[in-house]
Amino acid sequence: MTSLQQPTGAQPVRRRNNRSRRNQLAGLLFVAPALILVLIFFVIPLGMAFWMSLHNWPLLGKPRFIWFDNYSRLLQDAQFWISLRFTVYYTVIVTIAIFAVAFPLALYAERSRPLTKLYRTAFFLPVVVGFGSASLLWAWLLDVDSGLFSYVFAYSGLTEKRINLLADFDTTFWSIVVMVVWKTAGFNMIILLTGLQGISTEVQEAARMDGASSWQRFRRITLPLMRRTIALALILSVSGSMLAFDQFYIIADGGPQNRTVTAVYWIFSQSFMSFRLGYGAALSMVLLVILVIISVVQLRLLRNPEGM
Amino acid sequence: MKLLKIAALAATIVGALSSSALAQQKLTMWSRSTSEAFMPTLIKAFNEKHKTQIELQIVPSTEMVQKYATAAAGGSAPDFVALDLVYGPAFAKSGVLEDLTDMAKSLPYFDQLSKAHLGTGTYEGRIYALPMSADASVLLWNKKLFKQAGLDPNKAPTTWAEIETAAGKVNALGNGINGFYFAGACGGCNAFTFMPLIWASGGDILVDNGKRANIDSPQMHDAINFYRSMVAKGYVPESAKTDSGKNFFGGFATDKIGLSPIGAFAIGNLVKNYPTVEFGVTFLPGKDGGKASFGGGDNFVVTAGRDNLKAAKEFLDFVYSLEGQTLLAKGGSLPTRADVATEAVKSLDERYQIATEAMKIGRTPSSPFYNDIINSSTGPWKQMLNEVFFGNDVKGSVAKAQASMQSILDAAN
């Protein structure tokens, strides 16, 4: 047993120091693969994009260093600001719509019912379809000549004849919002569901014993305890919507009259349709900064008083 | 000993074969998917008769420009490319293309080559691209529907008023039949079919050597009013508003459209795939007559710095021969050499003759920024057309497009 006794004096301090240093090194080694990946796939490309944004960088021909000209040009780019405003508008509307559908779905799917698993699967199913494929499917549904919606509307007498839902801004916009809610509500439902299931049933029961109504329990217990889950779902939804592209490109082609061109669509169009890679990079940097600010604000607003 | 002899003989044969293979030049060429009907046949015929061998790769039309630009930047571009003629100036400006001026001028039939192609193939006085395949815009009318509507099926409309009247009568047949069709959300399609209406009326889109946009012109407003009137009267199907070009041809092929401005490519396609559609072909007219056409198609370009001019000349000589031009025509492209054009389309549908004539008067706006101002799906041309055909503020939309195009041109010049 004596051999296991800790020695006394200066020796253990040094050993502890050694150990903590070794621990630090081991920790660094453990995170090294992740760090390297972040460096290669995020930090370096970000640096390159910023470097590119300081150039007139055509796809054809040689890049020319122009300092911050791309950024000053961006200030006067009317379409970029229109696109950005539209993207924010879309993000607000679609996020509210997704939560309005996903929260009730989560509450419904949480309780044990005979077919709970089936419901959960059914609600989640559209999530596994890629945005590209889902957009193609909806492009057909919304088609004026061969699509299902215009046929149903005309057949049921809602419209006099087949209408072209993509010819008008409001119908195009709301069609895409419905499509995105259909596509992503299931994902948000699952996130919210994990939050709901994390709330101890004892707390709920105690409140019930104290005579709290179901609304009071939802308002005073469920919502506050789900703060972090809601924050996660909100940040994912907002950053995803701010980067929306596929559905507007595939279904509406930015139309009618460029009115559904999102910020990313405009970046894509400048970079790969007009071949101004430097300018596209500058637009991307600005969008990145805006996204970071939005995310930070969201995190602050949703932080618990005692810290998250 | 015998075995050794056989081995020596075999080695000689193999050596001879490989050295002859080395002597053969294997060159690579890209062509866009719309040329799939004639390019493979043309290349095959060339390879059979020449030592120089070309390996053709078909590239999706929508990806061609991006793919070629990226490949050129990375040094992996093909030796030759059949490039949409409107992109000639952009590539020439960037230094990707070989200067073909001397070779072109040495061709004895140089002055017979399509002017529209040479126009966009010339940049700052030097020739970088030569005609490969051609397509001219024309007006098609459905003879069966004309007959049903009480119109003379053999008389082509020659003014806008005649087009509108005929479209109205056909439209009155009802039953899902419409008088007129155009792809209302497609910049490229309308450059091809709407610009000629302005040219034939005496207007132009780009002036001062492509340095100034001339959108806000009386001819443009007249042409807009012509289309707007047909849209307002319901002659144009609802789907045209959002057609980004996918149904550019499809509408007329359904036998439910009276008239449609379209490319000559439609003639071959209709004859081959929709033999029941009876149609006539005529020129796109100006407001009170006249005629014009957009000269479209592909130009032949050579990637710079490869020392391939001799092979390029060999290939072009074949393309411009009667045999080459006939092969092109049979596959749906119009001939690009005027003095053999009539002979090349002789065995084909007579309606090709009109298209061939249209090609001779074909015009193409030449600008390195063509893509930005005209073809781009977020560009000012497409946005303006959709607004003015289907919206309310014609004056505002035209003025906005004029300013936007000019600012693109100014930023670049």
Image (spheres, helix red, strand yellow):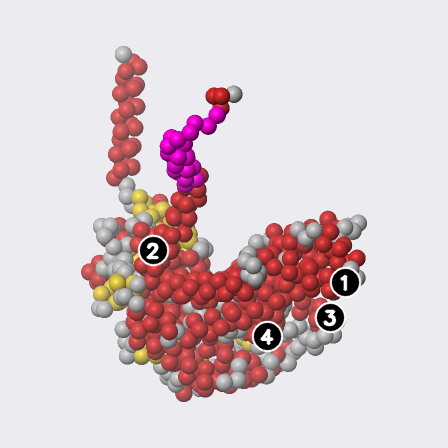
Q: Earlier in the sequence, mark 1 or mark 4?
A: 4
Q: Give the alpha-carbon distance from disc 3 to disc 1, as whole Å.
A: 50 Å
SS for callout 2: helix
Q: Earlier in the sequence, mark 3 or mark 1?
A: 3
Of tags 3 and 4, the one toward the viewer is 4
Q: What amino acid is at disc 1? A: Ala
What's the magenta region?
A: A5-29
Q: Earlier in the sequence, mark 4 or mark 2?
A: 2
Q: What amino acid is at disc 4? A: Asp
Q: Are marks 1 and 4 on the same chain?
A: yes
Of tags 2 and 1, the one toward the viewer is 1
Left or right of residue A34: residue B278: right
Of tags 3 and 1, the one toward the viewer is 1
Q: Is residue B214 visible?
A: yes
Q: Nearer the viewer, residue A115 or A129?
A: A115
Left or right of residue B383: residue A170: right
Q: What amino acid is at disc 3? A: Tyr
Q: Are marks 3 and 4 on the same chain?
A: yes
Residue under pointer 4: A170
Residue under pointer 3: A155
SS for callout 4: helix
Q: Which mark is residue A212?
A: 1
